[in-house]
Amino acid sequence: MQQSFPQPTFTLAGQTAIVTGGSSGIGAGIAHVLAAAGANVVRETCAGCVAFSTN
């Protein structure tokens, strides 16, 4: 299923966000919106696993 996320009305360019539980559900949605706003996103996806997302 394709998910639709709102387009942010703010910018986080040059900022870094750390999202725990970012592999699915609410955490994944938050990570997506933060990245869409220009943030570099670090997602903690499981115990000891880290995924980096950049714009």
Image (cartoon, rainbow, N blue to C red):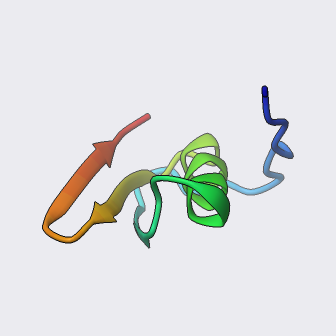
Q: Number of labelled discs?
A: 0
Residue 15 location, x and y as percent?
42, 61
Question: Residue at the spot x=84%, y=36% of the render?
Answer: 4
Query: Which one is nearer the viewer's eye here, 28 or 33?
Result: 28
Q: Position of residue 24 (x, y in %)?
A: 55, 54
Instruction: Using residue 52 as the reference point, say whether residue 22 is left or right of it.
Output: right
11 in relation to 18, above or below? above
Residue 1: image quadrant is: top right
Residue at 66% across, 64% down: 26
Q: Position of residue 9 (x, y in %)?
A: 83, 53
- Residue at the image point whose x is 74% and y is 57% from the top: 10
In the image, taking residue 11 as reference, residue 35 lies left or right, namely: left
Q: Would you place residue 24 above or below residue 2 in this image?
A: below
Residue sitting farthest toward the top: 2
The single residue placed furthest to the left in the displayed view is 48
Q: Position of residue 44 (x, y in %)?
A: 31, 65
Closer to the camera, 33 or 1?
A: 1
Q: Residue at x 37, y 39 (%)?
A: 54
Point out the image quarter for the C terminus. Answer: top left
